[in-house]
Each structure stands twice: as C-alpha cells, then as structure tokens.
Image (cartoon, rainbow, N blue to C red):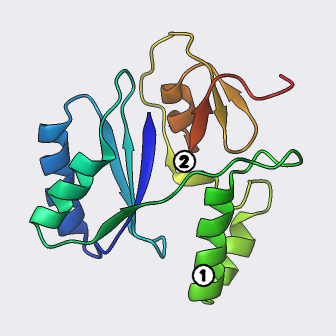
Amino acid sequence: MIEVFKTNINLEKDALFIEQQLKKAFPGCIIDFDLEDCDRILRVESPNKVFDPAQVIEILKQHNLTIEVLPDATPSRNTKISHRKIWLKACCFLGMPILLLAFLSCSAGKLNGCVDPAKVSEGPCTMEYNPVCGCNGTNYSNPCQARRSGVVSWSKGACNGN
C-alpha cells in the first residue's frame, strides 16, 4: 500500500523528526518527504501490510502540523499517469510559476518529474519478483528496483500491455 499526503512541513529537521515518529509507529514502512514539491509531500509505503492513513494524520496533528491525503483517481485510457500526479504538477505549475522552468527542463527524456535523478542509487535489492509499473510506464521486478531507478511512484503489477 502506498499513500501520499500533502503537509505543511517546510524544514528538513521537522521532516526528519516526523519520519522518526512514523517509523516507530509503522515499522517496516518506507517513509519519505519531498519538501521541494509545493504540497510538501509525505509518502508512506507499506510493502507487506495495510496501514490506516488516519493514524498517520493523527501523529502529525499531535505535533500541530497539517496533513491531508491526496486522493487517488482513475487514470484515463490514454495515459499511464494518474490524475493525482497530474494534479500535483498542475498545482506546482499554477501555484508556483518559478517551478515551471524546473518542470519543463526535467521533462526531456523523463515523464515530468516521475523520475528523480537524486534518488537513483546502486543500493542493494532482492531478486524477489513482485512486479510494479512505474509512473514512467516501465516495468520493474519489484518496488526496490523502481526506487533504485529514481522512480517516485508506481502501482502494483505489470504495466498494461506489457
């Protein structure tokens, strides 16, 4: 299960503190922030169990932070990008025109912010076959392989038509 939240966390130290709190509450979950996004994104991924997003919201509210779940939407037939991702980019585009240059410059060869070059790594991954479809329309053998490739979001299962 992957859940994406909009927060008001602006500082790296606050993000690190909340990350520690969430890791205590949800051991085994992958927790990361994108503070450069206009929505100050918190992403929580539970590789093997379902968690209650309300618990995440409660933890942040205990620290006087605002948080809301970004809703999922059904992708259209003609695209593999979810409406959530399009909405996030439109928000950044319309809400912060200065990001327009970064948005356009990152789109060459990548799927408009779907791949974060800063997150590409050579870190270890298991050979487990648990296919995921990256937001860039590429199949990965498991979530770790997608994450290691810098893909910022994916869905369970192989991409349609592949």
Disc 2 marks which residue? Answer: 152
The residue under label 1 is which amino acid type?
Answer: Leu
Would you identify the image quadrant in which residue 84 lies?
bottom right
* 162 relative to 127, above or below: below
Q: Position of residue 3 (x, y in %)?
A: 43, 46
Q: Quadrant of the C terminus?
A: top right
Answer with left or right where residue 72 lies relative to residue 144.
right
Reading the chain from its start, which is encountered first: label 1 or label 2? 1
Q: Secondary structure at mark 1?
A: helix
Q: Is residue 134 above or below residue 94?
A: above
Q: Nearer the viewer, residue 76 or 16?
A: 76
User: In this orientation, which residue lies closer to the viewer: 100 or 71?
Assistant: 71
Type of amino acid under label 2: Val
Please state which of residues 55 and 47 is positioned toward the viewer in this rendering. Answer: 55
Structural distance between the alpha carbons of marks 1 and 2: 18 Å
Direction from residue 112 to residue 142 in the image, left or right:
left
Q: Is there a contact, CB below 8 Å, between mark 1 and mark 2?
A: no
Q: Is residue 144 left or right of residue 100?
A: left
Task: Report helix, strand or loop for mark 2.
Answer: loop
Q: Position of residue 6 (x, y in %)?
A: 40, 66
Q: Which x, y percent locates residue 108? A: 79, 61
